[in-house]
Image (tube, helix red, strand yellow):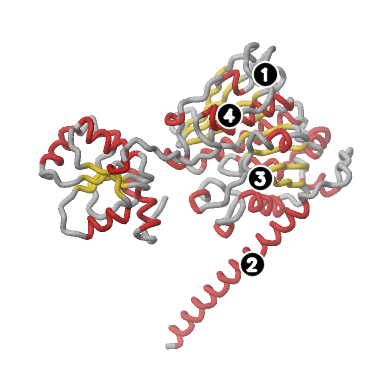
Amino acid sequence: MAAEAKAMNRSDRIRQLKARLERLHAEEMEIEAELCALEAEPATEPAEPAHQLSRDEIQRFSRQLVMDEIGVKGQLQLRNSKVLIVGTGGLGSPCAMYLAAMGVGTLGLVDHDTVDHSNLHRQIIHTAGACGSSKVVSARMALRRLSPQCNVRIHDQLLDSSNALQTMRGYDIVIDATDNAATRYLVNDACVMLGLPLVSGSAVRLEGQLTVLNYAGGPCYRCLFPVPPPPDTVANCSDAGVLGVVPGVIGCLQAMETVKVLTDRKRMDSPSLLLFSYKAAQPFRSVRLRSRVASCAVCGDAPSITRLIDYAAFCGSGPNDKTPDLHVLDPAQRVTCGELSTVLNGSRRCLLLDVRDEAQFAICSLPGAVNVPLEHFDRRRADLEQMLGELDGAPVYAVCRRGNLSQLAVKHIRDELGYSACFDVARGLLGWQAEVDSEFPAY
């Protein structure tokens, strides 16, 4: 009995301490948010550039100072620099942490999103306790702990054509740590108009890439990609996935390239794109890029784009990584998750067809669902025809994660296989969790 009581007391104490930590963290987030708001007010006078290092700085950065590549001159260049990072996610997290740790004097952080549990495997600047909080506030709190001497400015806003130039003006260099085409073109064009070098990185699944743009007469992003890709061909982390360490690799390299530019160590005799692949025997390779294009619409000799445009319209997608909802079916060919629940709980015969890939199906699925990935429809046509033939006209309900792939599956089954009793489950499994079963796992 004494042992059981001791174990219960221990468990209770653990719960109490965890609850106290949560309360303290919530209070800390509130204080940080208020402090951010107060410090956002413009200073009456700009800070004077430093001309010598303090005793604390010499101790802190001693391992960099002893290298000829940095030295006192380079450390002062970092100390007096102002760097803007657009995005505090998988790329921006390690990039910001290393730049602050290495002694960059002012870091600006732009992000309008909040921390989500699905971010934490790769966005290492944030913690579980910060979920639901502003990303820039969470990031600033982490950077304060890491490098109190770093001045962290936060811009808790969606960067768009109305505020990009004002936000970016006054910085020495910009780091694109975003994950969508619209913001990439926006940041590029604004950098060209302001004459700022741009360190651009991207990472998805098991691959990443990195380049420095608009620097020392080199190309800008539009020189390389004058026309955005079709929206449905652009992979994002939400749907395609990403191994946590991959954006970490690219984000660290973005920090390194930024330091090269700030300390005048960056060579631009031949612009290049660094490619990283997790699967390759040699994970890094460099590809030579074209030079600046004289006819480029934004950085060319006679630019046709002289002010920021509507980038969502230009790219056909918005400034975020959220997959747009498809609308390819008649509303009568779709059912709600609540309606599907009624069918599944009844006695009527039906086929619940899960069209996600095998990896996603293994994460979670609805009871009784049969997995035939949409990408395998052509290869498994005979299997599908056999399943449909055995239904004797009973309805088929196609489901996926969001309700996009399932619409394409329904269209295929109706048009290609001639089975009209086929319906899409609107909003997919995310809708099932929201409308039917709150305990169903979302990802």
Circle 2/circle 4 CB separation < 8 Å:
no
What kind of residue is marked 3?
Answer: Met
Which residue, given by chain and number where applicable, does mark 4 sit on?
Answer: 210
**Which is nearer the N-term, disc 3 or disc 2?**
2
Question: Which SS class for mark 2?
Answer: helix
Quarter of the figure with the N terminus: bottom left
Foreground tag (3 vs 1): 1
2 vs 4, front mark:
2
Residue 131 badge: none
Mark-to-mark CA distance, 4 and 1: 20 Å
Is disc 2 in contact with disc 1, using a CB cutoff of under 8 Å? no
Residue of label 1: 299
Residue 183 placement, left or right of 259: left
Q: Earlier in the sequence, mark 3 or mark 1?
A: 3
Mark 2 or 1 closer to N-term? 2
Badge 3 density bin: few <14, some 14–19, many ≥20, Cα 10 Å: many
Amino acid at circle 2? Leu
Most extreme residue toward the bottom is 1
